[in-house]
Image: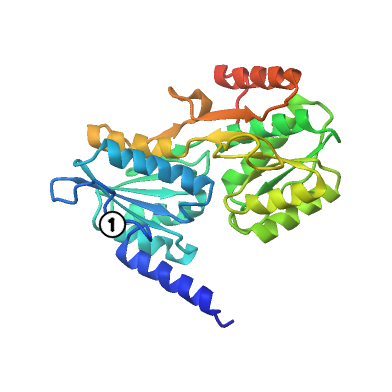
Amino acid sequence: MALTPSRRAGALLAAGCLALLTGCGGESAAKGGDSGSGALKVGVLFPGSLSDDGFMESAHRGYQRAAKDHQGKVAFSKVEQVQAADYEQALVRFATTSDLVISLGGQTDADVRKVAARFPKVKFAEIGGPADGKPTANLALYDPQQAQAAYLSGAAAALLSQKNTVGFVGGAELPAIVNAAKEFERGAQQAKPGVKVLAPQYVGDFNDAAKSKQSALADFGAGADVLGQILNLGHKGLAQAATGRGGRLIGGPIAHPCGSEKAYAGYVETDIGAELEYATDQLVNGTWKAEAVHFGLTFEKPQNDLVLCDGADPAVTKKLDAIKAKLVSGKITTR
């Protein structure tokens, strides 16, 4: 199929960014960083857009904080909006010039494992891969506990539902997202036994708003009135569907001021960027290890939270606070 002019321009832009290993519209080294030979070098692969209002943008905020905190000590480089076929190439280029290579998202799991094996002297970290994945000799795995966030989302959706029916829409049928869908259902049923949880829908693209809207309309048509989601730009399609059908959403991982987005009943907030900061801190301190680290509510500095918007029933808030406390204490565990 021939590319339209706009798509051709987008493909050329992505190719140019990959060749330069920059973040399209940004600098090769992080702003304020030192690209001198004495600086440690960190390369970060962002498969999606840094302004996706989701996983990638949350991670990029951590990238920016790390660059500021380690100014003069670490030189950062990044690439964004990379096609799946180019993940390996981007990771190889980073590996030839970096002390630490970080990849975002479970969609990069196979490629980062392959490249890490080829460059045993380079440190690698994957953020958001399979929760039960195993580190290798030079590959650390950081789990932002999307399953935990999804459990909270399911509990909130069930308690807020007036029709006693909820649904979940995921960007892709990746292991971490499938597991999150299961935890969404567990959270819903824990909070409100007997609630109907529709079969999860997987759009196939975290950023496709049109397909996400179709999935949401199907769920609303099947009786759901509150949806949970793990999407990036695709959540805009869910919001459109919810607005048109009188439904509501649980947003995240970035929370917005309540009332600023119609149809959002609340947000499950997850700081993806904290893992990127953790990896960089460990590198600078000389304490980096090829380990599996689980963040979320149970980490020393919690990175998950649930924010309900104004007007929530106090009884609902009380029940959700109790569920969150059980997650923190370990009385409730997610997979």
Relative placement, left or right, of 187 versus 256 is right
- Where is 327 relative to 42, above or below? above
Quarter-wise, where is residue 325 in the image? top right
Of 310 and 298, nearer the camera is: 310
Of 116 and 298, nearer the camera is: 298
Residue 153 location in percent, x, y? 66, 34
Tell me the residue that label 1 is attached to. 28
Residue at image coords 45%, 52%: 50
Residue 204 location in percent, x, y? 63, 58
Residue at image coords 20%, 40%: 73
Q: Secondary structure at mark 1?
A: loop
Q: Residues within 10 Å of mark 1 (few under 14, many from 20)?
A: many
Residue 230 in sight in this render: yes
Residue at image coords 58%, 47%: 175
- Where is 24 relative to 252, above or below? below
The amino acid marked with disc number 1 is Ser
Residue 249 location in percent, x, y? 70, 41
Quarter of the rendering occupied by the N terminus: bottom right
Of 208 and 120, nearer the camera is: 208
Quarter-wise, where is residue 335 in the image? top right
Residue at image coords 50%, 36%: 144
Q: Residue furthest front?
A: 260
Quarter-wise, where is residue 282 in the image? top left
